[in-house]
Amino acid sequence: MPEGRGRGIQVNKPRIKDVFCYGMTLSGVVIIFLLIILILYSLYIFRETLLTIFFPFIAAFIIAYILNPLVDFFQEKRIPRPWGILLLYGVFFLSIYLLSINILPSLAEEFQKMLNQVPQYASQIQSFLEKIHSDYHRFDIPVNIRRVIDSNIQEIEDIMMNYVEGATNYIFNFLGHIFLLLLIPLLVFYILKDPHSITGFFLGMVPLKYQDRVKSLVEDIDKTLGVYIRSQILISFFVASMVYVGLLLLGVEFALVLALINGITNIIPYFGPFIGAAPAVLVSLLESPLLSLKVILMITVIQQVESHVLAPTILGKNLKLHPVLVILALLTGGSFFGFLGLIFAVPVIAVLRVVLSHFREKAG
């Protein structure tokens, strides 16, 4: 009997230990999950302040990341890194000077003129919708259908007015923080001057036995982001140039500003072309419905060339992201961080994919 009891106690001990370990693991998972929720909630609450503070640093790291291969190239040609950076700055400011003589004055003039005409455009949009509302009332339409149409017209009017007001407020808010942009060239210089000390600092925080694994992970992230960022810049430049030429040929006002908006928003997958096309379509619609149809056709052709010819050639399949995952990332990023969230959503999700694939390989 004592032996049986002893055996019984020995059998039960591991079970109690397993239950205890399971409970501790579950508690740990719950605590980590709650911490993640708390961090995300805090980021959401203070998102505007955080974006204002960290925007120069984020922008500086992105610019430095893009320019670093050029500085490395100069260094290979035995040009010291500081002089290579100053050479790039010289080319940049010379380009700005040439642009300021030829392009920037007309861009600033168009931009100011468009801002001044925003109230007039808003009034024209409202009149246009009211005209549609009064025109369809002439027909003998059932009351129930008429109510649905009325509510939809009102909703469209509200959306369009909010779009105009929101875009204007965003522009003025951006211009209000323009002094922060002055920090960016200084930050870019120091990041490019000695990037290895920055990576070395962060790598030094990793335990020695994991450093090779982290280096491999960083190299894969660098490859993924490098292809994506440089490809998007080329594609956006192509789209902006083609839209500008198309708007000029069609005789649309503010062609330069509208093309610039189209090029910037083209960075956003799926939704970007629609967001960028909206101002051009609205401006042309207020001049002539036929002109707006021509603008829609022109932008559609350019987007088809970009999607089926240019993007596959330049970008390829490097990101390996499912469209549903991309859309989910865009909706999440846009909801939390607005326009900047839309721009950075895809690079962030691409980095997460690389990180998860590394963990999966090591686990396997």
Image (spheres, rainbow, N blue to C red):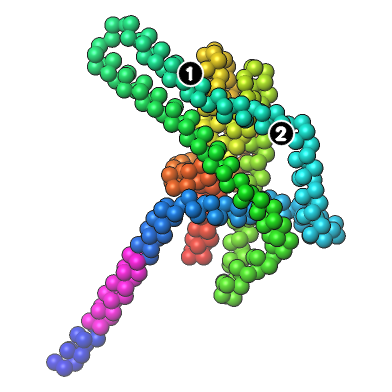
> What kind of element bears circle 2?
helix
Q: Is residue 54 left or right of residue 36?
A: right
What residue lies at 32% left-to-right and 18% top-to-bottom? 149
| Amino acid beneath label 1 | Gln
Q: Residue at x 53, y 51 (%)?
A: 52
Main secondary-structure element of the magenta-colored stretch: helix
Q: How many marks?
A: 2
Q: Residue 25: within the magenta? A: yes
Residue 266, x across and y down, in percent: 58, 36
Q: Residues within 10 Å of mark 1 (few under 14, many from 20)?
A: some
**Residue 69 position within the rendered picture, expressed as x and y whole percent measured from the top left:** 73, 53
| Residue 328 found in image quarter | top left
- Residue drawn 65% across and 69% down? 200
Give, as a single range, the part of the protein colored magenta.
Answer: 12-31
Can the viewer see residue 194 in this picture? yes
Neighbours of disc 2 within 10 Å: few (<14), some (14-19), many (20+): some
Position of 33 with respect to 283 (left or right) is left
Residue 41 position by quadrant: bottom left
235 part of magenta stretch = no
Q: Residue at x 36, y 21 (%)?
A: 153
- State whether residue 293 is above or below residue 159: above
Q: Secondary structure at mark 1?
A: helix
Q: Quadrant of the N terminus?
A: bottom left
> Residue 240's spot in the image, x, y percent?
65, 31
Outermost residue to the right:
78
Q: Which residue is mark 1?
A: 124
Give the labeled residue for mark 2. Answer: 104
Pointer 2 or 1: first along the chain = 2
Q: CA distance from mark 2 to mark 1?
A: 29 Å
2 sits to left or right of 289: left
**235 vs 363, nearest the viewer:** 235
